[in-house]
Image (tube, helix red, strand yellow):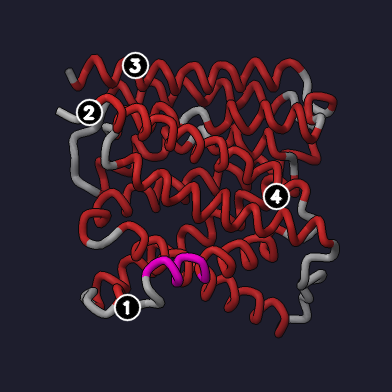
Amino acid sequence: HMPAAQHTNATIQIHVAVFLFGFTAILGDLIDMSAIMIVWWRVLITSISLWMLIGFGKMLRDLPRQLIIKYAGIGFIIGLHWITFYGAIKLANASVALICMSTTTLFTALIEPLYIRTKVNYTELAISIAIIPAMILIVNHLDISQINGVISGIVSAFLAAVFSVMNKKYIKEADPIVISYIELSSSWLLISVILLTMNLFGQSMSPFFPPTIYDWVYLVILALLCTTLAQILTLKALKYLSAFELNLVVNLEPVYGILLAIVILKEHKELNPMFYLGAAIIIGSVFLYSYLNKKVIK
């Protein structure tokens, strides 16, 4: 049985990590660059920091090539997930992007049985379906200009479900920091190829460099605190928390994020009460799911 102190530490670590993840949406809104450029810089800075943490690549040499290719493939999906996530923030706002991300549970409930060949969990499915009317409630009361943001956000949630199910399957095969490094550096490669292709077709990505000192500061916070540190805290906490406890806290991300959006970005001025009603239903159902799931597991 683990000491209570370790469990408490792990719980604090995961809350800090999730708070930092919630903060990424705010930073995405504050940084004055396109979604794809934000992700390009974020992944580059994070990869460099992880490269140093794994002893400048020494730990990579022992990994079988097939495994590296699998992690790189997952990394591509993560890259696309982030581009669509920041796309949702730029097309709508941070709160809308975060609420769309709450549908990840729904997609995970659908994808996991297919990918890992487990039995369908009907509790998951029922609660996931209950989220749909709440999403409709939100979308119906949004400005028409924000609908593209919702579409981008839902695509992002779908991709998040795909890579988390795949990660779950292969997480035990290598050191988590090494896995993060392979995934994020391959993310960066994919985004670089996308950027080059866009340039060839005359789509210049301006600005390429963060335009102001504030944008640089936000980017470094986004990469080192909200990505590298949050990732390491999550992986450390994973050792001492059950998947259930972990998911329960991760579900707080939209709560933290939306509260931050109200305080920092004053977003409640552009969203009406129906948005918050829909958000409350979604977040409530996700917690209900976690609660029922624990009963079922026992």
Residue 24 falls within the magenta-colored stretch: no
The residue nearer to you, when weighing 50 against 152, is: 50
Sequence-wise, which precedes: disc 4 or disc 2? 2
Kindly report which numbered mark, 4 or 2, lies closer to the viewer in this rendering.
Answer: 2
Judged from the image, the secondary structure of the residue bearing numbered disc 1 is helix
| Coordinates of residue 64 in the picture (x, y in percent) | 21, 76
Q: In the figure, is residue 88 to the left or right of 10?
A: right
Sequence-wise, which precedes: disc 3 or disc 4? 4
Q: Residues under labels 3 and 2: Cα distance? A: 24 Å
Res 3 label? 2
Q: Quadrant of the C terminus?
A: top left
Instruction: Tell me if mark 1 has few (under 14), some (14-19) or many (20+) residues whose alpha carbon lies within 10 angstroms of its own.
Output: few
Q: Contact, CB < 8 Å: mark 3 with mark 4?
A: no
Q: In the figure, is residue 220 to the left or right of 155?
A: right
94 to 61, vertically: above or below = above
Q: Residues under labels 3 and 1: Cα distance? A: 42 Å
Res 280 label? none
Residue located beneath label 3 in the image: 291
Q: Residues under labels 3 and 4: Cα distance? A: 32 Å
Q: Residues under labels 1 and 2: Cα distance? A: 33 Å
Residue positioned most to the bottom = 200
Residue located beneath label 4 in the image: 28
Q: Residue at x 46, y 38 (%)?
A: 104
Judged from the image, the secondary structure of the residue bearing numbered disc 3 is helix
